[in-house]
Image (tube, grey):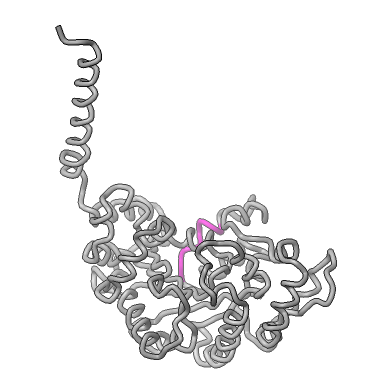
Amino acid sequence: MVQRSTKFTGICIAIYLGYTLFVFLILPLMLPDPVTMSRNILFQQTQDAKEYKNFTNFTLESGGQPVRSILITFHGSGLSGLLENLSRLPGAYHHFSPLIAYKERIKVMPQAMAAVDELHSLLNCDYNRSLEMIKYGMKSSTFRNLYGMQWKTCLTYTMEVCSKPETLSRICKIFPFINMSVYNLGLLYLKSLLELEDLNVRMILIVRDPRATMSSRDGHIWCSSHSCRQPEDLCNNMVEDYQVAEDLLREYPHRFSIVRYEELVQDPLDGVINLYNFFGLPTKSLVNLKPNFTISQAYLKYNFEMPYSWKHRLTYNKILNIQVVCRKAMALWGYKPITELVENMTNIFVPLKKLALFLK
């Protein structure tokens, strides 16, 4: 007679084998391919919205030209919630941090030009130059969550399937809006993308008080490199971007703009609506939120930080040190240094000088 424990073990093994057979053999046969699944999701998200009528005229798959946009910022910019919203926006395919494999800001000319070529290819849904990005980025759950349709694809299919360049390319080409968020490259090199008429790309540079940026970086594992932890590197880059941005505002007033984080979050929902409008992205769902949507709800939706929270996080000595090494950057971007720590810090914020800011 078979013992009860032996029977139980046999039943467990049979259940496990059945589950394995279903998940790895039967279920994949029942699922549509990733491109078909993405197409179905896109159709469901956009079928009832007038903003999306005839959007196939703007897809690479149909031979059209998508609406392309690039958001440029620095690590610690406080924009993770906004980028997540961009990655979930119906009709939009988001290239999140496509230069992630470089780890730090690119400053050497050959690397920078190669990076620009890579971004150009990605804006055309070509992943042949981005194998390192895929290899490095797909190890991060945050990257998968924010990169295009990966948050859906990787939940349904194996990592091998969801990170396949051919699959990514085909999915990307069905979307009418292709946006990108770039951390590791400055305007000195990114401006060449504005010069390409076939792209017709729009760019927004979002800058933030360096004291707030360093406060956001403090203690995070992703900010373990020497350059990330030093305000000198950040502020030197801010100075370089300012000098290039002045020219770009004059040359491309309808396709390049600047906004400061502190201005964006003063009226966060209107700020995001204005940003989306500049990029040419759909805003009807956001406009519909406005009548009963509070500023607090907007902060929660986009995970924005309070603009002056750094005064409670940083020691006074750290604040003084950042102000010393960032004197030029702060002066250019209109951030007033403080000489003593006081409760009411709103007086340290002054408008940018002679810059035609898109967000008033």
On the image, which quarter does residue 34 sit in?
bottom left
Q: Which region of the structure is painted magenta?
A: 280-287
Is residue 9 rendered to the left or right of residue 242?
A: left
Q: Please report the residue visible at 56 percent of the width from the left and 84 percent of the height from the top.
A: 237
Rendering coords of residue 287 (x, y %): 56, 59
Query: Residue shown at 44%/84% (left/top)?
Result: 190
* Rendered residue at 30%/73% (across/down): 130
Q: How many marks?
A: 0
- Residue 284 place in picture, x, y as percent: 50, 59
Image quarter for residue 112?
Answer: bottom left
* Left or right of 280, for residue 101: left
- In this picture, residue 154 sits left or right of residue 293: left
- Look at the picture and state if 39 lies above or below 65: above
Instruction: Name the quarter where the C terminus is drawn.
Output: bottom right
* 284 within the magenta span: yes
Q: Position of residue 99 (x, y in %)?
A: 40, 74
Relative to 335, 187 lies left or right: left
- Furthest residue toward top: 1
Residue at position x 32%, y 74% in the image: 122
| 358 within the magenta span | no
Q: Nearer the viewer, residue 359 or 30?
A: 30
Which quadrant of the rendered structure holds the N terminus?
top left
| x then y, percent, for residue 94 | 40, 65
